[in-house]
């Protein structure tokens, strides 16, 4: 049986997969079972920060694999502590909880908000945004402000309220309620169609959190780790969040989630409050250390230049209506359906993603100018 037939027989059919089985990769190039090459502008949904099988990352991960693999969190491990130190030093946050995915990083943030709220006036409501996406667990689905994800899976935990992104009055009214303890948002709504929040909206949220003594929590699962041309997207607007969650690109291809805790919440979680068997596993942490060491200003500048090159190249395309997003997280509104464009690009050797009705680009941060140009040409032909 072929890979696709085996998948159909044995794997729960939750994914709408592209009709291709990928077997190997090198940087921003992936190869299918027939040896066909594709330029990758999806990075495994913003995960492969430096592309496939990046030599520096592979070396760091294999060195750790040959040294010490899994230990559980019953013991201290060097890669995890080193990674936590690096994350705190680069963000000004004070503590980190490690997990394995974006949903889990967010689950931890929700628990921190609940416990902090309990200790600060018995407040438990967390305000999130309509059109958001925070994960697939029951609690993170409840935080997700999209009805389509709620179908079939209720009842959900209570204590979530949703505000329209960009609507300052709605935000002000929601955050003034006495039972609210936190607001939780993505700086750029990724799955919601690569829709950035305006700086003024984010700044207002920060101000209201100060006024009403609430936690400002940001979901940077997709926007974090250099994706938007800064280490975290909130850094573009000079915000000082209390909680930041991230995952996806953090370990450059290995499963790792992190919940970063600022000064106000650094001591909220105590012994036994939360845990994860695999979270911050030495191998994933070693991969993440190697990624973080390379996320520097030179790389961010290049990401911004290359992003601008994509935007400029699409400007004269009559079938492109608008490009949204920042850095290497771009959403393209098109005249023709995004799904059809993605299929046509695939047929021409380019992997792009979709988000809502947009074509979504999330290239590896170090894609070469040559491959980028080749990818842009295929995209322009098919858009
Ligand atoms: C903003 C955001 N939060 C959370 C998640 C969930 O992450 P994971 O699939 O790793 O659980 C995603 C995944 O797309 C995301 O984009």
Image (cartoon, rainbow, N blue to C red):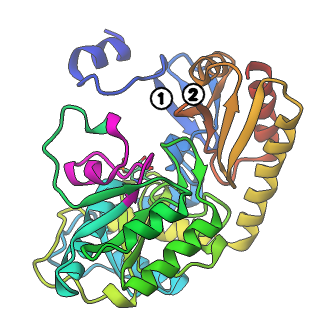
Which of 244/336 is in front? 336
Decide if residue 168 is on the left or right side of residue 376: left
Left/right placement of residue 12 relative to residue 228 reads left
Single out the residue that lies furthest toward the right: 316
Find out whether residue 343 is within the magenta segment.
no
Q: Quadrant of the N terminus?
A: top left
Q: Quadrant of the C terminus?
A: top right
Q: Which residues are magenta?
A: 128-148
User: Can residue 66 be seen in this snapshot?
Assistant: no
Q: Quadrant of residue 16?
A: top left
191, above or below 359, in the image: below
Q: How far across and how far down the image is residue 360, in percent?
A: 61, 37
Q: Residue drawn 46% across and 70% down? A: 172
User: Which quarter of the picture shows residue 56?
Assistant: bottom right
Question: How far across and down, in percent of the image, does residue 123 sit?
Answer: 21, 76
Q: Earlier in the sequence, mark 1 or mark 2?
A: 1
Residue 218 vs 381, above or below: the answer is: below
- In the picture, measured across the screen, residue 220 lies left or right of residue 213, that is right
Viewer-closest of 38 and 18: 18
Give the SS element for disc 1: strand
Which residue, as the protein is rendered here, is positioned at the far left? Answer: 272
Q: Which residue is mark 1?
A: 23
Q: Is there CB contact under 8 Å for labels 1 and 2? A: yes
Q: CA distance from mark 1 to mark 2?
A: 6 Å
Neighbours of disc 1 within 10 Å: few (<14), some (14-19), many (20+): few
Foreground pick, 61 / 228: 228
Tag 2 residue: 31
**Residue visible at 28% across and 48% down?**
141
């Amino acid at each position: 049986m072929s890979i696709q037939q085996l998948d159909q027989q044995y794997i729960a059919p939750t994914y709408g997969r592209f009709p291709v089985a990928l077997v190997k990769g090198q940087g921003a190039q992936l190869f299918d079972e027939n040896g066909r090459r594709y330029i990758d502008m999806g990075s495994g949904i913003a995960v492969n920060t430096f592309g496939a099988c990046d030599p520096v990352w592979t070396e760091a991960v294999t060195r750790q694999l040959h040294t010490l693999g899994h230990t559980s969190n019953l013991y201290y491990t060097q890669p995890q502590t080193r990674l936590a130190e690096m994350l705190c030093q680069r963000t000004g946050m004070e503590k980190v909880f490690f997990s394995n995915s974006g949903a889990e990083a967010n689950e931890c943030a929700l628990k921190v908000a609940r416990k902090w709220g309990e200790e600060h006036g018995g407040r438990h409501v967390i305000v999130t945004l309509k059109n958001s996406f925070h994960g697939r667990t029951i609690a993170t689905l409840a935080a997700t402000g999209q009805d389509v994800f709620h179908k079939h899976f209720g009842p959900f935990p209570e204590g979530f309220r949703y505000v329209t992104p960009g609507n300052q009055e709605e935000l002000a009214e929601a955050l003034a309620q006495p039972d609210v303890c936190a607001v939780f948002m993505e700086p750029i709504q990724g799955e919601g169609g690569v829709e950035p929040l305006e700086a003024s909206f984010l700044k207002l949220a920060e101000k209201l959190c100060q006024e009403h003594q609430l936690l400002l929590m940001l979901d940077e699962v997709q926007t974090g780790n250099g994706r938007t041309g800064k280490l975290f997207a909130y850094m573009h607007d000079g915000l000082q969040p209390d909680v930041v969650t991230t995952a996806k690109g953090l370990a450059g291809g290995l499963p790792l989630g992190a919940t970063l805790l600022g000064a106000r919440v650094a001591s909220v979680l105590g012994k036994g409050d939360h845990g994860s068997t695999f979270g911050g596993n030495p191998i994933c942490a070693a991969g993440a250390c190697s990624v973080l060491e390379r996320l520097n200003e030179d790389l961010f500048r290049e990401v911004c230049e290359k992003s601008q090159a994509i935007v400029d190249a699409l400007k004269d395309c009559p079938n492109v209506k608008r490009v949204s997003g920042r850095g290497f997280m771009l959403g393209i509104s098109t005249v023709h359906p995004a799904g059809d464009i993605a299929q046509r690009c695939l047929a021409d050797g380019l992997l792009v993603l979709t988000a809502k009705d947009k074509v979504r680009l999330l290239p590896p941060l170090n894609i070469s100018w040559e491959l980028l140009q080749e990818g842009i040409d295929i995209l322009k032909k098919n858009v």
